[in-house]
Image (spheres, rainbow, N blue to C red):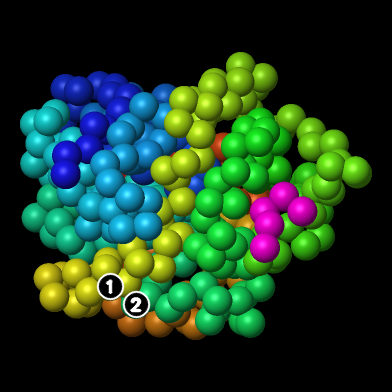
């Protein structure tokens, strides 16, 4: 089924193309500082993945949101703008999306980046939470998808503010760990904890993100947390894609990520280093999960250095 993909494009005449791919709960604006910086020298595309803002989501959220579906969306978008080769740049789920795209589209995606560890083979979140409790919310999103969507849609701004916390204003203890709710750590109807505005967005930027999420709600955004989609992605990769990703891969992990407190330990636990022979890791300090917004200069420096020395030499 075809998917309509909404995107922002700058410097279409640029020789080399970067495709910026977001995660959850994000839209293209999570790449705002990078679009400004890299469009000076590159053809830049920042997309809203299927189900977000104005991008359509054909089919069922539990069965039609595999990684190869998203890879096909990226390929269709690049075909639409007449680009034959690109670097896929990812944050959050965009990290896995980009490396899977490099795996699925080796003739198109010439290099990939991420901020979170790569998972070479699928292990359900409920089997990982004993080692990494901060993935409890992923169990909730899979097991109670309808309830999670309703919870998140109740107050879109509150849902976004709860997630976009920074190095200096981390979320409350217990956030992300619960497997039966998402916002419980911020209180309930009888005792809400006030959530401050997002510190690394202007009020206009926050308002824009809220408006974009209100277009479709969170209804079609939880697909990469679904076990069925992940199993089908795994089966597709085993049948069609190489296990070793030979293209250059860059990781720019933050040092204070509440989702992944120890990037290297999780990479080793997942066996990611074994399938990424051309890997570069550049950690950014004083940043929580949303490193592209919280420390844009340091992130941009890491990305530019890698592009200059490993990709477009």
Residue at image location 66% in from the left, 40% down from the top: 159
Residue at image location 12% in from the left, 31% down from the top: 80
Principal secondary structure, stretch drawn in magenta: loop
Of residues 188 and 55, the one nearer the viewer is 188
Q: Would residue 53 be counted in the magenta stretch?
A: no
Q: Earlier in the sequence, mark 1 or mark 2?
A: 2
In the picture, measured across the screen, residue 288 lies left or right of residue 31, that is right
Image quarter where the N terminus lies is: top left
Q: Identify residue for label 2.
A: 121
Does the residue at mark 1 contact the one at mark 2 (Cβ under 8 Å)?
yes
Q: Is residue 280 at least partly visible in the picture?
A: yes
Of residues 210 and 293, the one nearer the viewer is 210
Residue at image location 73% in from the left, 58% down from the top: 175
Q: Secondary structure at mark 1?
A: helix
Of residues 247 and 52, the one nearer the viewer is 52
- Which residue of the protein is positioned furthest toward the top in this rendering? 204
In the picture, measured across the screen, residue 300 lies left or right of residue 139, that is left
Q: Secondary structure at mark 2?
A: loop
Q: Which mark is residue 277?
A: none
Q: Which mark is residue 234?
A: 1
Q: Is residue 39 at least partly visible in the picture?
A: no
Q: CA distance from mark 1 to mark 2?
A: 7 Å
Magenta stretch bounds:
180-184
Residue at image location 51% in from the left, 40% down from the top: 218
Is 242 placed above or below 310 here? below
């Amino acid at each position: 089924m075809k998917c309509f993909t909404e995107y922002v494009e700058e410097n279409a005449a640029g020789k080399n193309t970067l495709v910026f791919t977001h995660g959850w709960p994000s839209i293209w604006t999570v790449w705002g500082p990078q679009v400004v910086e890299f469009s000076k020298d590159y053809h830049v595309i920042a997309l809203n993945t299927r189900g977000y803002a104005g991008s359509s989501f054909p089919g069922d959220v539990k069965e039609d949101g595999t990684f190869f579906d998203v890879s096909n969306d990226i390929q269709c978008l690049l075909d639409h703008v007449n680009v034959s080769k690109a670097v896929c740049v990812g944050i959050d789920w965009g990290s896995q999306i980009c490396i899977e795209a490099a795996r699925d589209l080796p003739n198109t995606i010439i290099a990939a980046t991420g901020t979170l560890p790569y998972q070479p083979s699928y292990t359900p979140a409920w089997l990982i939470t004993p080692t990494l409790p901060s993935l409890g919310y992923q169990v909730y999103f899979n097991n109670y998808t309808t309830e999670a969507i309703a919870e998140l849609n109740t107050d879109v701004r509150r849902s976004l503010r709860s997630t976009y916390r920074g190095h200096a204003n981390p979320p409350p203890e217990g956030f992300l760990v619960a497997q039966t709710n998402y916002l419980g750590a911020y209180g309930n109807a009888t005792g809400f904890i006030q959530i401050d505005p997002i510190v690394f967005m202007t009020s206009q930027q926050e308002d824009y993100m809220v408006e974009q999420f209100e277009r479709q709600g969170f209804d079609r955004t939880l697909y990469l947390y679904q076990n069925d989609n992940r199993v089908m992605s795994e089966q597709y990769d085993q049948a069609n894609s190489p296990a070793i990703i030979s293209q250059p891969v860059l990781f720019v992990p933050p040092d204070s990520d509440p989702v992944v407190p120890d990037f290297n330990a999780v990479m080793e636990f997942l066996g990611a280093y074994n399938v990424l022979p051309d890997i570069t890791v550049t950690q950014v300090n004083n940043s929580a999960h949303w490193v592209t917004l919280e420390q844009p200069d340091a992130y941009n420096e890491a990305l530019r250095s890698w592009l200059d020395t490993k990709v477009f030499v």
